[in-house]
Amino acid sequence: MSRQREWLLIRIVLALLFCGGVVEAKRALFPTDSDYGIILTFRGGEMRAVALDPTGTRLAIVDGYGGVRIVGATDGQERQRLPTWEAPNEIVGAPELIWNRDQVVFSPDGHYLAQAGQRGLRVWALDRDALITLAAAPVSSIGALSFLPDGQLQVRATIGGIYRWRLPDGVPTVFPATPLIGQEVWAFGGQGRWSLLCNRVASGDFLPDMAVTVSDIGGDEVERVIVPQGGSCSELVLGPDGTMLAARSLGNQYHLLDWRAGRVRHTIQLDSASGGGGIGFSPDGSRVLLGGEGAIRVILVRTGWGIGTVRALPWLDLRHPVGFSDVQMSADGRLVVALCGDIALRVWRV
């Protein structure tokens, strides 16, 4: 066996062991993994992004080659596979920039799947297993991706603004926006109504402030919240109530913001200062799950108190620490999904 294959096998075994973790949460939050949890791995490949469908029965997982696998959320059985991009598209944007991450999302009715990443944007009609050609699709990479409640696809292109399509063959509505730069994080929230921007701004201190801007797409309402000495932002999620925001900054520090009141409600520092990430709100917005290196913390939004933890033991090889990321909760609140490292996916029943 080659040294590369031996190392891959070791990584998979460690992921299975250490992502099994130690559960330190109330049963109402996370039952024991031996009863309910499942672990998924890909033979010879990594996992870059994951999405739960609206019914909580399917998972879409982006592999290391840009392909997507649709699997059962509770049994891990593969149901459908979408092929990789044969070659990189001619897009504008450097792959090392933060907004060039892989993203995947289901439509509200579960009939479509949108995927974005370093190679651009593509949409699949899952019931027909067919790729849809989007009219006037952006030629730049994608900073944010979502579906609206009425089924329209909405994307934030790094160049060209915000696009909305009515699938399968609609002509897009385009809302102008400034081009993205490397130190910005974009997202959508409020069922697609709000455009979210997180970037760093100069301050009088050594560490720059973090600025979070919420804009009404197509409207005039704009609000801005400053996180003193927040530094660079790496993730931004708006809660289901449309008011509370969660932002992650350097050092695994999370900030809960009330953007309408213009203030920081709580700041949570996870145990580890690096690795991991991921933010997922519960459907009612009362709890938020924060991923990090070695643990997922469950936080009460109202108080900022931790009420549960799922831990993963660290890798024996410290060059490859276990980090939970891409943390999500299903729309019915019954499943929690998180990537563990880049080669394992954990699913818990709640």
Image (tube, rainbow, N blue to C red):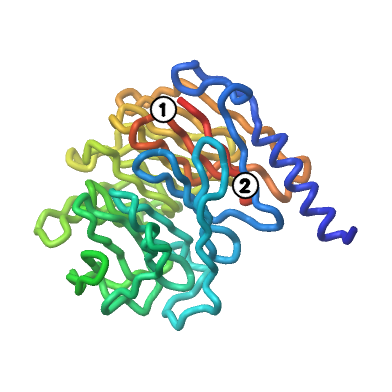
| 2 and 1 marks in contact (CB < 8 Å) | no
Q: Amino acid at mark 1?
A: Ile
Q: Which quadrant is home to the C terminus? A: top left
Q: Secondary structure at mark 2?
A: loop
Residue 165: where, in percent of width, then height? 23, 67
Task: Write down the residue under mark 2.
Answer: 341
Residue at the spot 76% in from the left edge and 42% down from the top edge: 13
In this rendering, does residue 273 appear at all? no
Residue at the spot 47% in from the left edge and 51% down from the top edge: 60
Q: Front-most of 112 and 218?
A: 112
Picture layout, residue 14 above or below residue 4: above
Residue 176: where, in percent of width, then height? 19, 72
Residue 207: mark in rendering? none
> Marks 2 and 1: which is nearer the front?
2
Q: How many tags in the picture?
A: 2
Task: Write down the residue under mark 1.
Answer: 299
Residue at the spot 53% in from the left edge and 59% down from the top edge: 81
Q: Which quadrant is home to the N terminus? A: bottom right
Crowd rating for badge 2 (residues with CA inside 10 Å; few <14, some 14–19, many 20+): many
Q: Secondary structure at mark 1?
A: strand
Residue 279: where, in percent of width, then height? 42, 41
Question: Of the residues under marks 2 and 1, which one precedes in the sequence?
Answer: 1
Q: Front-most of 338 and 257?
A: 338
